[in-house]
Image (tube, helix red, strand yellow):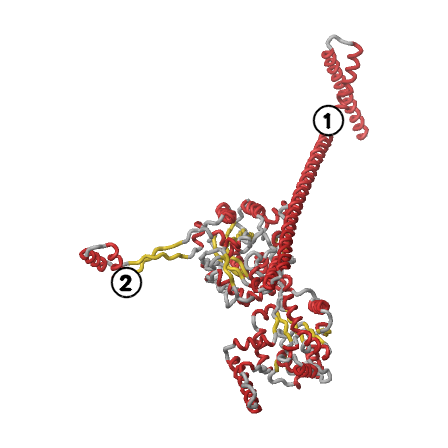
């Protein structure tokens, strides 16, 4: 596989691997060889963790080893769907595959994972249909045409009789979806022409090599399992953050009515496995889910599940810089191949819909390491708990839940619970009005019922809070509970569930002592992770509230002296540790003590926020902060500056407004300068890298040349040694039998100095040859006589 570290590579590997089965069966595990997609490493991709059955290979640094490994593989999975594909690697792999020898014993399987983007410029298929009109429609249509075209009554009557004698048919055009048999007509845009060329190249390879089985798998736009960065990731990310309404409002390219062919990556992996297992003759396959949702429907589903549900249409030209714009602008009605339509084992057959979105959100949270952050902050009145809860909510991008939010939620409920709460509140108001009427004097004014404020009973607040916590924002991101639950009893109702038919006799004493709340189950999903308690003296709290609220307004609020005394007494009673049933004691039984922090509310704001952040981030920063990028921060900063300018303009502070504009222009100029500097530094860095690469290449070439020269020199020396060894017997023979006689002949030649030295030397050598022959005959006769004497001696 190429790009084994990509989302598709992960999915295919997890689908095809069998090492978790072969441990028990004793069979041989599938071995995977793969290359790395460098773009996925540079981007915010899912980390890749090699296993014992995966080996990473490199075609650039080790081309020979790469070629040998590719040649011995049985299955080739080539992914040209994922961004960052190295087509040089693809070309090399295709060449190796095409050069494989034909082998009837072992079949080689090649699966090319391609994209529906190769179809987007294909002319639409349409057929003309005719529909017969009813007699009434036919007459109306005929009359309209006659009134326009004819002038005389006779002509009108003649044409009306003709129309009535033949049935009137209406022609209309019906567009048909593309199917896999139309693959020869597909027309890609220029950017995807290379994808189509690779598809055609591999399909023709099967014709030239019978041992190859090549399939092209044309996939819909992939989604799921954490999302690929260039398609739906940014929509999930922005919806998940919801830092700002504008930021959480998802964009729609154009009118959003275009049909998007999409596919879950796990279904894509299953299709690859199906093509490997089954021997299909067909070469080109289309795989997508059974949905035919428009772009707007898909984006709306994501926004509702994770964010505020708001969308905004943008012109396509304004979104060209976004990586996902080309994918979400596709308008393609295409059907999956029959073999995939009939299969039953689908992971997400319905696409990105209301039925599957919760599963997709859970996948996104799990694969991206996103988990809800749940905080409870409490304290006496005027301790600033709402203020700090708001700051934490803005910093971590999680919902801030107050009792007032629950009251607003109650007003929007139209179900039985909402009616019960409204009925109870009306009964409380009736009682207050009745009590007032009993004690009212003649001079007292009539009581305005609309201004009467009553409290919602706690048992209704529990149910409202449960509804609030079930909303998508709280389920995915978490929450900050501001001042509720107020006491031990509230916490028991919210976070504990009574076990029916609980019998303590079934448990031993040790188990009962370890259980903090016998007879109850803890609702772990609703339980906060961090508890912050603000503390302060009553006198100081009263003094603080008088400094915050003007005296003329204080008496009309529940922060007046009487109201503060009442509320402080309730708070002190609920936090009296002598009773043993306090909010702190409840949470200390369920949470580690280092997750609970008491803070003095009169410390400096920066000090308090730092302490709260240390508590929340002591095990690492919440994962939600990893989704915030520089673009988001700049956007929010621009919004804040715009809001500040508008406020200065409304207040008439023209000088400060001009200063603000000057600072903004200066900031913009500075940003542009920094951008230019960064681009220049990047160009310089690229140039340095290019020069360094060229230097390394030259050095490598020089080393190669030196090595070749050394090899040639060594080959020459080896050749000389071989020749010397081969000529040694000949030279020895010449020295023993020829050279000495030739030297003697030359000496005689020099002494006598004959007229014809050549003839003299030849005659001399002939005489010497005769002497040698005569000497050899004598030696042979002597040897024969010696053997004869020895033989006679042995006989005697």
Compared across the picture, whether 616 is left or right of 144 comes to right
Q: Can residue 628 be seen in this view?
A: yes
Q: From this viewpoint, is residue 459 visible? A: no
- SS type, badge 2: helix
Circle 1 crowding by C-alpha within 10 Å: few under 14, some 14–19, many from 20: few
Q: Nearer the viewer, residue 189 or 321?
A: 321
The residue carrying mark 1 is 730
Q: Which mark is residue 744?
A: none
| Nearer the observer, 167 or 514 | 167
Residue at 72% over, 76% down: 535
Residue neighbourhood size for the residue with mark 2, other residues' Cα within 10 Å, grouped as few (<14), some (14–19), many (≥20): few
Q: Please state the horizontal and vertical placement of residue 318, each as a whole percent of the image.
A: 52, 54
Quarter containing the C terminus: top right
Left/right placement of residue 478 relative to residue 792 reads left
What is the CA distance from the residue labelled 1 to the residue labelled 2?
A: 118 Å
Q: Is residue 502 above or below residue 195?
A: below
Residue at 57% in and 50% down: 85
Q: Residue 178, percent across and down?
A: 43, 55
Q: Is residue 14 above or below residue 212?
A: below
In front here: 626 or 447? 447
Task: Give the mark, 1 or 2, whose residue is nearer the N terminus.
Answer: 2
Q: What element carries label 1?
A: helix
Q: Residue 411 at what x, y percent from top left?
A: 53, 77
Q: Name the residue under label 2.
A: 137
């Amino acid at each position: 596989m190429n790009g084994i570290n990509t989302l598709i590579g992960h999915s295919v590997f997890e689908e095809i691997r069998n090492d978790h089965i072969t441990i028990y069966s004793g069979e041989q595990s599938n071995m995977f060889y793969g290359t790395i997609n460098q773009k996925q490493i540079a981007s915010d991709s899912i980390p890749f963790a090699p296993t014992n059955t995966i080996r990473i290979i490199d075609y650039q640094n080790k081309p020979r080893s790469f070629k040998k490994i590719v040649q011995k593989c049985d299955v080739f999975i080539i992914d040209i769907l994922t961004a960052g594909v190295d087509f040089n690697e693809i070309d090399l792999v295709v060449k190796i595959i095409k050069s494989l020898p034909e082998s009837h014993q072992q079949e080689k399987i090649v699966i090319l994972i391609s994209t529906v983007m190769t179809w987007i410029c294909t002319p639409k298929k349409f057929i003309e249909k005719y529909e017969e009109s009813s007699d009434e429609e036919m007459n109306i249509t005929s009359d309209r045409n006659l009134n326009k075209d004819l002038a005389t009554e006779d002509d009108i009557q003649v044409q009306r009789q003709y129309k009535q004698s033949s049935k009137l048919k209406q022609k209309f055009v019906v567009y048909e979806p593309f199917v896999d048999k139309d693959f020869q007509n597909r027309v890609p845009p220029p950017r995807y022409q290379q994808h189509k060329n690779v598809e055609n190249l591999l399909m023709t390879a099967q014709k030239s090599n019978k041992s190859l089985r090549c399939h092209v798998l044309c996939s819909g736009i992939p989604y799921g399992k954490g999302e690929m960065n260039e398609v739906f990731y940014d929509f999930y990310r922005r919806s998940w953050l919801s830092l700002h309404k504008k930021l959480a409002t998802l964009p729609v390219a154009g009118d959003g009515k275009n049909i998007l062919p999409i596919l879950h990556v796990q279904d894509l992996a299953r299709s690859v496995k199906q093509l490997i297992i089954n021997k299909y003759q067909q070469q080109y396959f289309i795989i997508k889910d059974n949905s035919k949702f428009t772009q707007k429907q898909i984006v709306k589903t994501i926004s509702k599940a994770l964010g505020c549900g708001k969308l905004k249409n943008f012109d396509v030209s304004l979104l060209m810089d976004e990586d996902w714009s080309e994918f979400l602008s596709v308008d393609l009605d295409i059907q999956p191949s029959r073999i995939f339509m009939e299969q039953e084992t689908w992971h997400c057959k319905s696409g990105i819909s209301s039925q599957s979105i919760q599963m997709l959100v859970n996948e996104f949270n799990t694969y991206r390491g996103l988990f809800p952050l749940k905080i409870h902050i409490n304290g006496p009145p005027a301790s600033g708990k709402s203020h700090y809860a708001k700051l934490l909510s803005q910093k971590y991008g999680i919902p801030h839940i107050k009792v007032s939010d629950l009251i607003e939620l109650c007003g929007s409920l139209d179900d039985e619970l909402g009616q019960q709460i409204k009925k109870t509140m009306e009964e409380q108001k009736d009682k207050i009005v009745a009590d007032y009427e009993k004690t009212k004097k003649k001079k007292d004014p009539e009581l305005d019922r609309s201004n009467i404020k009553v409290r919602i009973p706690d048992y209704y607040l529990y149910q409202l809070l449960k509804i609030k916590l079930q909303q998508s924002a709280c389920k995915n991101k978490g929450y900050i509970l501001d001042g509720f639950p107020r006491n031990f009893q509230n916490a028991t109702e919210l976070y504990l569930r009574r076990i029916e038919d609980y019998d303590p006799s079934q448990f031993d004493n040790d188990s009962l002592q370890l259980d903090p709340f016998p007879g109850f189950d803890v609702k772990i999903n609703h339980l906060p992770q961090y508890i912050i308690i603000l503390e302060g003296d009553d006198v100081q709290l009263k003094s603080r509230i008088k400094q915050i609220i003007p005296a003329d307004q204080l008496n009309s609020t529940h922060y007046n002296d009487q109201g503060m005394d009442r509320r402080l007494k309730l708070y002190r009673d609920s936090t009296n540790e002598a009773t043993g049933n306090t909010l702190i004691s409840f949470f200390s039984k369920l949470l580690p003590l280092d997750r609970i922090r008491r803070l003095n509310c009169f410390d400096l704001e920066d000090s308090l926020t730092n302490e709260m952040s240390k508590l929340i981030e002591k095990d690492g920063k919440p994962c939600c902060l990893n989704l915030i990028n520089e673009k988001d921060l700049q956007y929010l900063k621009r919004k804040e500056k715009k809001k500040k300018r508008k406020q200065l303009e409304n207040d008439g502070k023209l000088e400060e407004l001009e200063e603000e504009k000057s600072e903004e222009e200066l900031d913009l100029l500075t940003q542009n300068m920094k951008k230019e500097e960064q681009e220049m530094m990047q160009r310089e860095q690229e140039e340095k890298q290019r020069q360094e690469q060229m230097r390394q290449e030259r050095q490598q070439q020089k080393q190669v040349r030196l090595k070749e020269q050394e090899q040639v020199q060594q080959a020459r020396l080896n050749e000389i040694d071989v020749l010397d060894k081969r000529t040694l017997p000949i030279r020895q023979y010449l020295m023993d039998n020829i050279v000495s006689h030739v030297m003697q002949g030359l000496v005689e030649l020099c002494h006598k100095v004959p007229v014809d030295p050549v003839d003299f030397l030849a005659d001399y050598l002939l005489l010497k040859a005769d002497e040698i022959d005569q000497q050899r005959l004598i030696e042979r006769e002597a040897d024969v006589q010696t053997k004869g004497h020895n033989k006679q001696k042995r006989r005697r």
